[in-house]
Image (cartoon, grey):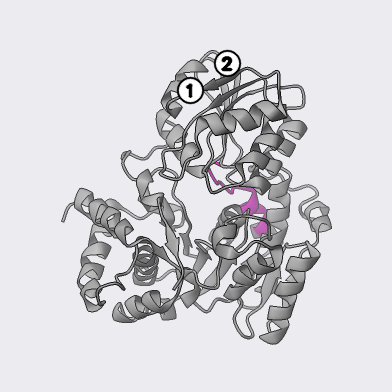
Amino acid sequence: MTYADAIQFLYDLRWFGAKFGLANTFKLAALAGNPQDQLRFIHVAGTNGKGSTCAMLESVYRAAGLRVGLFTSPHLVAFGERIQIDRTPIGEGDVVEEIAALRPLLKGFPEGEHPTFFEVATVMALRYFAARRCDLVVWETGLGGRLDSTNIVTPLASVITNIQYDHQKWLGETLESIAAEKAGIIKPGCPVVTGANTPEALAVIAAKARALGSPLTLVQPTAARLPPLDTLPLPLLGRHQRMNAAVAIAATRVLAAQIPVTEAVLHAGLSRVHWPGRLQLITRRGGQQVLLDGAHNAGGAEILASALAEFFPSARPTLVLGILEDKDWEAMCRMLAPRAGRILLVPVHSERTAAPRELAAACRAANPTVPLLECAALGAALEAVQQDPFVVVAGSLYLVGEAMELLQVSAAKTGGERGLNEWSASRP
């Protein structure tokens, strides 16, 4: 099997969709020897900020001298971004080796119950981390929590960054129902840390923690301004990242008896954290500045609009915007269009993309005088803005990943793996 064969195998798994439920993952993990039983986890869920919080936790514990596995999704450019040890993505040869080991196990599933791409990727990560004896795994949920494939682990601690509206089709239409799905990662007796602050969501999380005897630590917004965050420089742009950092710090303190972390290590880890595609500012040859930000839901768009107002108050950037149809794209356009001096609407390279004409109408309603251009593809939009001094590319992590390839920001050699992020879900 070559690496290209392995990636094609993963593509073929997409035919089985994305199923909510743990039975398949438990079964596949058992056939693989239950590698999760050899590992320690911090399990992270939440609507926004969970990837950044995972990156912060990973950086802190790596600074403490631990061998740290990191499992996140989606990837921006290359599949290996999902499975990293000490921030080194899984190698192509290891991907081939893992798939070769797992493929025979899939024959043990009856027709109609074949494991999905995400289920296989989850168990692949577990095998890889266990074989390399990771001291700790920072483990991000894919979607929701309760029925997410990652929820077969029993963590040292569960972290829920926040609860906002997203994926309502699958998680429910209210903050309470979304919170119930995220709170599904709470395990009996295992501590919980959350930055959720809406009363209805917090009530659900607190009730679940009480029912399971799981100590709950609530991180208040004021924690983002308290030591050490009052003076600590964070490489990640945006005020919201200080709240993510406060949640990460709270988690390390909850686990201090099991994994001690000194203040010096905490400072070192947070000051070196890296997480691409989230308010990532790059300067191109010629001086053009490009801000790449996933901003993939209404909460993310609000964060981006606030960051533009705070860090670039006098700028009216060119906005290149592409959003998935199943997001609240009208609200996102209302938040972002007023900040722009020019807007180019593009399709996301996804079956779920919103049409540029729909986005154009929403942006025009929010900013009637802004020049608008509908483009057939992101590449055409980036060509059209080459002379613009400040460009923001936003609306989807899929779009940001494509931009990273086209702008040659990513060091990944392969360009055919972004499509692995595509999914359609069904409940068990």
Of residues 305 and 332, the one drawn nearer to the viewer in this rendering: 332
Relative height, residue 65 to residue 4 (above, below): below
Q: Which region is colored magenta?
A: 266-277
Determine the CA span between mark 2 and mark 1: 11 Å
Residue 62 position, x and y percent, is: 53, 59
Query: Looking at numbered disc 1 in the image, what kind of residue is underneath it?
Result: Ala
Relative height, residue 124 to residue 285 (above, below): below
Q: Secondary structure at mark 1?
A: helix
Whether 94 is among the magenta residues is: no
Query: Looking at numbered disc 2 in the image, what kind of residue is underneath it?
Result: Asp
Residue 52 position, x and y percent, is: 59, 52
Q: Quadrant of the C terminus?
A: bottom left
Q: Is residue 387 visible to us here?
A: yes
Q: Quadrant of the N terminus?
A: bottom left
Whether 269 is among the magenta residues is: yes
The residue under label 1 is 381
Q: Is residue 237 visible to us here?
A: no
Residue ID at (34%, 81%): 30
In which quarter of the view is residue 345 placed?
Answer: top right
Please tell me whether mark 2 or mark 1 is closer to you in this view.
1
The residue under label 2 is 388
In which quarter of the view is residue 313 placed?
Answer: top right
Relative height, residue 385 to residue 109 (above, below): above
Is residue 30 toward the left or the right of residue 391 in the image?
left
Relative height, residue 414 to residue 117 (above, below): above
How crowded pointer 1 is (Cα within 10 Å; few <14, some 14-19, many 20+) is rated as: many
Of residues 302 and 293, the one drawn nearer to the viewer in this rendering: 302
Q: Which residue ends up furthest to the left in the rendered image?
A: 1
Of residues 245 and 181, the one drawn nearer to the viewer in this rendering: 181
Residue ID at (49%, 69%): 148
Is residue 162 toward the left or the right of residue 282 in the image?
right
